[in-house]
Image (spheres, rainbow, N blue to C red):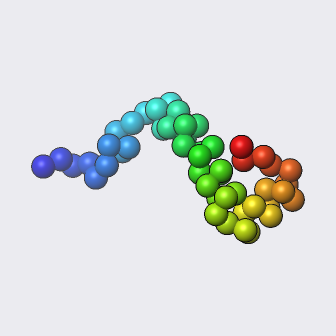
C-alpha cells in the first residue's frame, strides 16, 4: 500500500501548473455552456471562455 492518496500529491509545482493550464480552458468553456450564472459573469467581465 502507498502513503499517497493521489498521484497529484507527488507532482512538482511546475507539473501541477501545466496540468492546470491544460484543464482550466475546458472548465471555463463548460461553465459558460452549462451555467447561466457564469455565462452572465463572463459577459459582464468581458471574458471569452473560448
Question: Would you identify the image quadrant in which residue 21 lies?
Answer: top right
Residue 13 shows in the view: no
Q: Nearer the viewer, residue 39 or 22?
A: 39
Q: Residue lying farthest front? A: 33
Query: Residue at (67%, 58%) from the top-left corner?
Result: 33
Left or right, 24 with reference to 11: right
Residue 14: give x, y in percent of width and height: 50, 30
Query: Residue at (65%, 51%) from the top-left corner?
Result: 28
Residue 32: give x, y in percent of width and height: 69, 57
Q: Name above or below for residue 17 compared with residue 28.
A: above
Q: Residue lying farthest bottom? A: 37
Left or right, 34 with reference to 17: right
Q: Nearer the viewer, residue 26 or 17?
A: 26
Left or right, 15 with reference to 25: left
Residue 3: give x, y in percent of width and height: 21, 49
Query: Residue at (73%, 69%) from the top-left corner?
Result: 37
Question: Would you identify the image quadrant in which residue 40 lies?
Answer: bottom right
Query: Residue at (31%, 49%) from the top-left corner?
Result: 6
Left or right, 49 with reference to 7: right
- If the image is split into quadrants, where does the C terminus sit? top right
Residue 45 shows in the view: yes
Residue 43: give x, y in percent of width and height: 84, 57
Q: Name above or below for residue 25 compared with residue 42.
A: above
Amino acid at each position: 500500500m502507498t502513503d499517497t492518496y493521489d498521484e497529484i500529491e507527488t507532482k512538482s509545482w511546475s507539473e501541477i501548473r501545466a496540468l492546470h493550464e491544460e484543464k482550466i480552458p475546458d472548465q471555463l468553456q463548460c461553465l459558460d455552456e452549462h451555467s447561466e450564472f457564469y455565462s452572465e459573469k463572463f459577459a459582464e467581465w468581458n471574458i471569452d471562455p473560448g
